[in-house]
Amino acid sequence: MLSETAVAVLEESKKRGWVLEPDAKRLFADAGFDVPVSERVRSEDEAVAAGERIGWPVVAKVVSPDVIHKSEAGGVAIGIESPGAMREVFARLSNIDGFEGVLVEEMLPGIELIIGGKIDVQFGPVVLAGMGGVGVEIYRDTAIRMAPIEEKKVDSMLDDIVASSILRGYRGSAGVNMEKLRKLIAGFSSLIVEMADLVESVDLNPVLCTEERCVIADARIILKKNDK
Amino acid sequence: MDFRTLFEPKTMAVVGLSLSNERHPANIIYNKNYFRYPVKVFGVNPKGGTYHKEKIYTSISEIPEKIDLAIIAVRSEHVPGVLRECIDSWVGGAVVISGGFAETGRYDLRRQFEEIAAEADFPVIGPNCLGIFSPGKVDSLFLPSERMVRPEPGNVALVSQSGGILVDQMVKFAGQGIGLSRAVSIGNKAAVGELELFKYLARDEKTDVIAFYVEGFGPGEGREFVKAAGRSPKPVIIMKAGKSAAGIRAVSSHTASIAGDYDVFSSVMRQFGIVEAKDEYEMVSFCESLSCYPGGIDGRVGIVTASGGHGAMAVDTCEASGLVVPQFSEEVQERIRGRLSGSVQPIASLGNPIDLTGSARDDDFVIAAGELSRLPDIDCVIMLLLPYIPEVTSDVGARLSQVYQEEGKPIVAYVPHVEKYRMIIEGFQLNNVPVSDSIDGAILMVEAMKRCRPC
């Protein structure tokens, strides 16, 4: 069963056809997933204050109903170290079409993964996981399963990814927290089944994974079109 | 839905028999069953008359016996009426050969068809299909008998959305010595689709392997199919047409863009242990292999050959296919070496692959196969036989099959498929050991056993 928050978020966003990042994050946080500490701000001063509270360096992302792919529109800035840098970034982001504020977030380390879901015509809800970031459609190093999947099936899913050895620790570099990653993928696969009547597809990209945490750093929810 | 009377009918009616056209599908079907199958055939045509000195009935309801199977080959607009008559006359099931439904824009007729069948839970195959071939029982394929290639009766069932592909697969089965239990062309699948037939074939005692050719599943149909087929103790093989990404509209999420229709199809089949064949060659190889070994293996392979080149090629292909070729221990190697014939002993290499060299005799192959079959860390043995080396005899196929019968570990053989080696090939095949005509094909057979497990 979807929570009231989830239903409210999805209903509110219906007209736009997709869910703004701060709302999507609220939905996932409410469902028990790990998201970054963040504040949505509307002015330069608020942005600086948010940076002070969260602790530099921070990330700033544009909030705009016109911008579905933020990086492509120049709407993401990472590694903002100071109030001065924040003011510059804010000025730039505020010129983007449909500007409705900025999301200031803690800057997190980690391997970038994508975890996604879509409602397939023949097979219903499916879940996808693999190497994320902006190059995801170039490398296409991902695996697909019909949702939901159990935690104990996640390892064999990740075995399908070429880069799975990176997740498990490669040549001295630390791997990711597999227990948290298993929980995240299995939990998300159940959530996509619950949302199957309302959504078309979901991208969690990137999900930042370290030895300690697996955090949903960005989330995009495309809603089902009503016209059918 | 019970399909038993369709596959093994005692009585059948052919509706739409022509009095003037001997090449009419209904007449071809009437004739082949009337003359060559143990089924009592009744012709139906509203005009009545006689055919082969037998009475033609003016309707199904007029036939004095209960009909197990009705073949319907009338114009599409008459089909709904004939279906209702079948149901009213307690006919066991039907095959509708006629086209002219959704594929020509007559969605109204298609809807009527669906509604009539659903209301009565009436098992009806089609429309627009070739129907059923059940070896030794019945044949509704409207292809003249003399033109058909019929595989031997066996344990593989074929279900195909395309009649042409079905007949083609039957030709290939016959060529490869694969036995068939049932063949069904399901056409437009208005009432009966893959799922319904899967459920029946999973219980059918004549069938051990179920193979499908699909063009696509309807909305949600794929999900129901894999849920059922994924639990099947009988191996399920599937070949799909329409893999290209054409027709995928612009999408706004990465996930929707990466997880295209075919990517999802292929991944989900693997997830549920349904073995996807990428082409007809794989389809035939998988059917042959799984009809002998429906069990499933981890994929640790021992290879025996008489040529270093064959061994090296096989190892490459195994590794590319995710199969493991483990090195044998010194102890195992010495034990095998001690039993080989004198001329082979000093020159054979035994690491895996085992290369018995061109001096190998039948006994050497049998010893190597037996030793590998008893190793616990090997779950399948590939025999690359070179029948042209001087000491190999035509008994080698039957003798190696004996090793399988005794040890119970799957053996797959490669033998060039030319007429002069036929006795070796049959020595394997008649004893339930699959034989491929290429090294790659033999490895595909092993791969099939590995892939029929869910992941």
Image: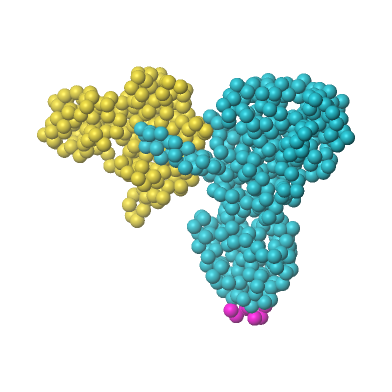
Chain colours: A yellow, B cyan
Where is residue B316? Give x, y as percent: 50, 62
- In this rendering, position of residue A25 left or right of residue B15: left
Residue at 62% from the left image edge and 29% from the top image edge: B100
Q: Is residue A180 visible?
A: no
Q: Quadrant of residue B354?
A: bottom right
Where is residue B441? Give x, y as percent: 59, 58
Q: Does residue B445 lie above or below A62 as drawn?
A: below
Main SS of residues in magenta:
loop
- In this rendering, position of residue B372 left or right of residue B405: left
Residue at 54% from the left image edge and 42% from the top image edge: B241
Total number of numbered labels?
A: 0
Residue B343 within the segment the image draws in magenta: yes
Q: Quadrant of residue B123?
A: top right
- In this rendering, position of residue A77 left or right of residue B311: left
Q: Does residue A198 lie above or below B156 as drawn?
A: above
Q: Nearer the viewer, residue B249 or B149?
A: B149
- Of all residues, the one furthest to the front in this rendering is B20
- Of all residues, the one furthest to the right in this rendering is B53
Where is residue B307? Give x, y as percent: 58, 72
Q: Nearer the viewer, residue B232 or B157?
A: B157
Q: Does residue B128 lie above or below B148 as drawn?
A: above
Residue at 47% from the left image edge and 42% from the top image edge: B244
Residue B448 within the segment the image draws in magenta: no
Q: Is residue B76 visible?
A: yes
Where is residue B204? Give x, y as percent: 73, 39
Q: Which residues are magenta?
A: B341-347
Quarter of the rendering occupied by the N terminus of chain B: top right
